[in-house]
Image: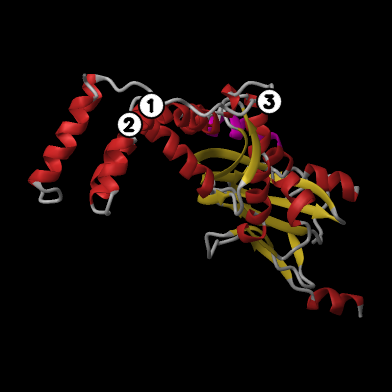
Amino acid sequence: MALMDFIKKQFIDIIQWTEDDGDTMAWRFPMAEFEIQHGASLTVRESQMAVFVNEGQVADVFGPGMYKLTTQTLPVLTYLKNWDKLFESPFKSDVYFFSTRQKIDRKWGTPNPVTIRDKDFGMVRLRAFGIYAFHLSDPKAFHTTLSGTMERYGSEDLEGQLRNTIVGHISDIFGESGVPFIDMAGNQEEFGKALKAKLDPMFQQYGLALDSLNVQNISLSEELQAMLDKRIGVNMMGGMQAYTQFQVAEAIPLAAQNEGGLAGLGAGVGVGFGVGQQVAASMGQALNPAAAPNAAVAPAPTPAPAAVSADEIVATIEKLHGLVGKGMLSQAEFDAKKAELLKKLG
């Protein structure tokens, strides 16, 4: 009877894995009630590794190549099984194949803005996204920490964890580097290198190697980006005083369209330039809080009408004359306003 049971057993003499997709990272060779024949052939292809597991304990690990399974090629398993050198019987063992092919173009990004402390802007909220590539480098660590006894373990089972870990380290990198957002956004390659160095040990504990990590974009949240754009625009125009003067000049055509608009504008030309300087100082502090003094600021006294320079009066007359050419102001209105402004030169 024992002889008949032995004859009925099925033996495996070829062990191999032909990958049928690009996502499987670990695959268990189907054993069922089969046993591995002594002297069986093990084929491990390029970009693969194979692991023999005995009673839950990782034994022998094989890289690419073709192997004849004997006590010489299975030293750890031989030791665990207490086989002698004359062992020639079939044996049972779990065999796992691992794909070491590089997984490329894996995307990461912040689903929500990350709050960090910035040297220039104080507390800001950032968004960032990019791509990374990795491969399985240590099948023993991967088996014991991630894939275990699963029949198949794919990259889709892992990428959520990797992506969240990358995002979770962004605030640490900003805090440790002390580099302002403006400088970091302008040197994304260096930021990517710093982030990769931070993440390498975490990937290694999973049996993975992080081959590359690229930062494609770093940006502020929408409301903060709008404020930054306004600040950049003011600086490009030569500062807050120039910006205020530009706003006054732009208001002249709008004032001409309203009844009494030009009269009010002409009467307030002197006051306008004085108030513009006050507004410039206030806006400058709002856009650059770091420049504001620590002590409380007392309310500013109501400014007295400032003297109007000859250049400012001439510039106003020229703008009014332009309105005549556009048909927005009659010649009579222009002559009256011109005479009024020239009196200020006396």
Cα–Cα span, label 3 and label 2: 28 Å
Q: Earlier in the sequence, mark 1 or mark 3?
A: 1
Tell me: residue 52, above or below residue 195. below
Q: Residues within 10 Å of mark 2 (few under 14, many from 20)?
A: some
Residue appearing at x 53%, y 65% in the figure: 20
Circle 2 — which element?
helix
The answer to whether the residue labelled 1 contacts the one labelled 2, judged by CB atoms less than 8 Å apart, is: yes
Range of the magenta residues? 191-201
Callout 1, which amino acid? Gln
Mark on residue 245? 2
Query: In which quadrant of the rendered view does residue 269 lie?
Result: top left
**Foreground: 248 or 259?**
259
Q: Which residue is mark 1?
A: 241
Using the numbered discs, state the Cα–Cα distance from disc 1 to disc 3 in whole angstroms: 23 Å
Pick the front one: 235 or 283 = 283
- In-image side of 218 versus 50 (left or right): left
Magenta includes 196?
Answer: yes
User: Residue 194 lies in what quarter of the image?
Assistant: top right
Q: Residues within 10 Å of mark 3 (few under 14, many from 20)?
A: few
- Rendered-image quadrant of the N terminus: bottom right
Confirm whether the magenta stretch covers residue 219.
no
Query: Is 275 displayed left or right of 154 in the figure?
Result: left
From the viewer's perspective, is 290 left or right of 143?
Answer: left
Q: Is residue 109 left or right of residue 26?
A: left
- The spot of residue 70 in percent (x, y) is 74, 49
Residue located beneath label 3 in the image: 296
Amino acid type, label 2: Gln
Distance CA(mark 1)–CA(mark 2): 6 Å
